Image: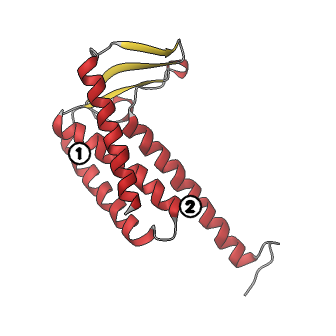
């Protein structure tokens, strides 16, 4: 249950920040947070990362429904007793639903976080949450792989039967 609450928090924070940007900024308007490093820049995107697949909403609806279903399945079946896995899946679930709401309601995604220093594509809380979730999932997978090797080979690298 806690993982669904975290996902709901991520989704709510994502939607709140998008509403604030949408209502208070013109598209293209930029507010420097750290000059030449980071800004809040109002942008819209009808595609995926880096603007790929522009206007393919049906594809995003389908993919998101499959991904959300898969994440919920994994939370239900595999997250018990594995808090890092549950947290990673919650971040991904909240992010996926956050951008899904935009595509469903606005027919575009509101982006506003701009790392100017590296000229990274403008993104949002949902995108950041998805990225954080994937990174945490990779850490979880590496930890599980290490535990399996230790169980199989022991801490000193010798094989145990």
Give the structural element (helix, strand or loop) at label 2: helix
Q: Is residue 37 left or right of residue 108?
A: right
Is residue 95 at all visible to an observer of this figure?
A: no
Q: Which residue in the structure is indicated by mark 2?
A: 141
Q: Position of residue 96 (x, y in %)?
A: 33, 47
Residue that numbered label 1 is attached to: 59
At mark 1, the secondary structure is helix
Label 2 crowd (10 A; few <14 / some 14-19 / many >=20): some
Residue 106 sits in which quadrant? top left
Q: Give the x, y percent position of residue 159.
A: 77, 80
CA separation, marks 1 and 2? 28 Å
The residue that appears at 25% across and 43% down in the rendered structure is 100
Residue 136 vs residue 55, the one in the foreground: 136
Q: Earlier in the sequence, mark 1 or mark 2?
A: 1
Q: Residue at x 46, y 70 (%)?
A: 80
Residue at 53% across / 12% down in the picture?
A: 36
Number of marks in the image?
2
């Amino acid at each position: 249950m806690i993982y669904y609450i975290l996902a709901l928090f991520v989704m709510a924070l994502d939607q709140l920040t998008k509403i604030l940007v949408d209502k208070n900024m013109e598209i293209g308007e930029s507010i420097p947070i750290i000059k030449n490093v980071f800004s809040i820049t109002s942008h819209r995107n009808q595609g995926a990362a880096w603007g790929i697949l522009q206007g393919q909403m049906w594809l995003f609806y389908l993919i998101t429904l499959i991904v959300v279903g898969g994440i919920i399945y994994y939370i239900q079946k595999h997250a018990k007793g594995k808090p890092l896995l549950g947290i990673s899946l919650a971040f991904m679930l909240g992010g996926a639903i956050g951008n899904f709401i935009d595509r469903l309601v606005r027919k575009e995604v509101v982006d506003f976080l701009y790392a100017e220093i590296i000229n990274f594509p403008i993104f949002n809380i949902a995108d950041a949450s998805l990225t954080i979730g994937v990174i945490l999932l990779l850490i979880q997978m590496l930890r599980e792989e290490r535990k399996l090797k230790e169980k199989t080979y022991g801490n000193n690298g010798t094989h145990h039967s």
